[in-house]
Amino acid sequence: MVSLAATRRPANNFMAPTVSSSLKRKQRDASPDAEDDALGQAKRRRVTFDPNINVQIVMEVEKSMELVAEEVRRAIEKHAVGEKAEYDQLRSLFSEAPTAPGTAHSALLQKYVIALRDVVPLLDYNCKGLVHAIIDCSWIARNDSFVREYRNLLRSLLSVHPAYMSTVLQMLISMFLTPPSTTARAQDDPAIQAPRLTQRIHECLRSFLRQSPMASTYLGPIIASTFPFADDTAKAHTRYIRNILQVSEYCPELKGEILSLVTDKIVKIDVQIQVDMDDLEDDEEELVGRAINEAEEEDMSDNESVSSEESLEPEDRRKRQIQENVNKLDAVMDLLFSHYDSVFAKGDLFDSDELFESLLSQFANIILPTYRSRHVQFLLFHFSQTSADLTERFAGCCSHLAFDQLRPHILRVAAAAYLASFIARGAHVSGAVVRDVFDLLCHHLEHLRLKQEPGCKGPDLRRYGTYYAICQALLYTFCFRWRDLIVMPDGRVPTDEDIIYHDGDFTWYNGVQDILRRNIFSALNPLKICAPSIVAQFARMAHHLRFLYVYPLIETNKRVRLARSMAGAYLGGIGGRETALTNKRGDDMFLLDAYFPFDPYVLPRSKRWIEQDYVQWKPVPGMPVEKDEEDDEDDEEDDDDEEEDGDESESEVEIEAEIADDVPEDVDDLSTEASL
């Protein structure tokens, strides 16, 4: 190796070149390397920077469409042969959050979306990871152009690979339950409002339903499975229900299914409220009042303090849960009233008829079989009174269910209660409908009496339950609609003056007075089985109107022990021995429940829908409403503790309450008499 230091000449030994040496030097300079060096120096001298020129850095967002398409195609093809690097990089583009640092802008991601649409047939089962990343990506809050191309990609994907239909629909419906954030967008996306996000979801659903007729078969079960849980917030329920009701408008094949689903869910909440209230000592009005105050103060806010919730006592926590459920039910009922009203208000006979048929179906299949439903049935109560035809149809539906021998006994009893409560409470139910229904009930009551009285050994709810249910329905209806049963000479409804100054007995419609007299004083003895509160109110009003005088029968019934009489009836008339168990239970277990489904509506917000449709109970003009003297005498005979309880319960007996607070104590004279 030659050292460069050995060939270096000292500077002081420098000699001027000779002619020959200068020629050699020129030859070396003319060599190709020298020419390249000279050219490089000349080029470097020509490079200058102009400050007036806008210098731009080329980013990935400016990738050409051809380059992106080639990347996508190559990544999928390599993934098919086991090379996953480019495939995983492509999948990560859709998996990353749009707000994360270094994430691709929407403009670049849109090119990948367009490129993927061209290779949809290649997205087979081996590419399911990429497909799921595409479906689950944050797309809803991006710009309109990106959303449009993304929707086209999903449409192409579902056309070629329909197996992904349920996954795509589940992604969209889940946004009704958990709304997407308006900030889940890239830097190059404009700001967007929440209503626009919801609109985009419905646009996608409408597009997929229009494209694939089979999409609705997947959509129904997904909507049902995604429905909020009963303990979710009121906002979650109203938001989800509002959106699925909107889905039912552009997916008519799911309309009945969606409406039935909503009814089924809120009926369960309604019943749970009643069950929880029974377990507490507070009355319904107090709990509803608290719910109203909380709704005004918190405005249905979901930001509740967890620490304060945990610090409550168990009973206070249960009360708070009841108040939240009351707010929830109230908000949903108001939403449903508004939705149904928007259809009936249009006046389209076909749409109104279809919707009312759906309501009747929900009533027969969901509401009627549910014991102690309190508020949901008022949807039918309100919209049945929007026209005379709908009133008659609902009354006819209840009548058919009440007298259908193929249905279970408990459903027939409930249907009779619904029929009587609707006729009694409906402000827009005409007098003609009241008389027709009352006459129909009397006809069935008389038919059952003639059939069952010959073999009757005493009042028995278990044997003659339908008979007693019809009789109680008649007593209840009479207490509210007695004016419509009075026949005036000129055919008009009697006024208060007619009632007060009328001499003699009134003329009653179609012999209902005689029919009720025969049944009340029959061996079936319905006044012993019917709810005491209704019997007491009927006795007062019937006596004042000179309709019937039943007080002697009520006094006699106090000496009839149902526990014995029923046992005697089952033993062929032989008096049954009263055990400690029957003595402990008393007669209450053998009485009809004073349940009438259209009792006063107490939800504060949605109450406005039925205020003009509701009949409040009013006493007969001139009839004093006072305490029973016999009840006072019974209370005086009790000890101090029982007297205090009796004083609290001896409030003014109103049919509104439907609670037998003033039921007198049964007098046990050791009689085994089963009937009068």
Image (spheres, helix red, strand yellow):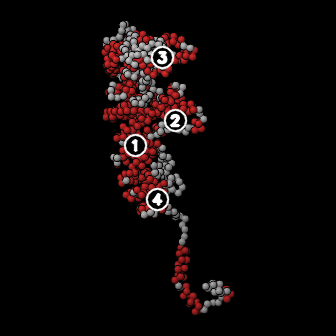
Between the C-alphas of marks 3 and 2, the distance is 41 Å
For label 2, the SS is: loop
Q: Which amino acid does label 2 sit on?
A: Met
Find residue 94 and report its horizontal and vertical position in percent.
47, 55
Write down the quadrant of residue 312 in the picture. Answer: top right
Which of discs 4 and 1 lies nearer the camera? The answer is: 1
Which amino acid, by three-letter code, is at mark 4? Leu
Position of residue 173 relative to residue 578, above or below, is: below
Q: Name the residue under label 3.
A: 663
Residue 294: x percent and y percent?
A: 54, 32
Pair 2/4: label in front: 4
Question: Which residue was labeled with disc 4?
Answer: 90
User: Secondary structure beneath disc 1?
Assistant: helix
Q: Nearer the viewer, residue 474 or 171?
A: 474
Q: Are marks 1 and 3 in contact (CB under 8 Å)?
A: no
User: Which one is in front in this view, the residue at disc 3 or the one at disc 2?
Assistant: 3
- Image quadrant for the N terminus? bottom right
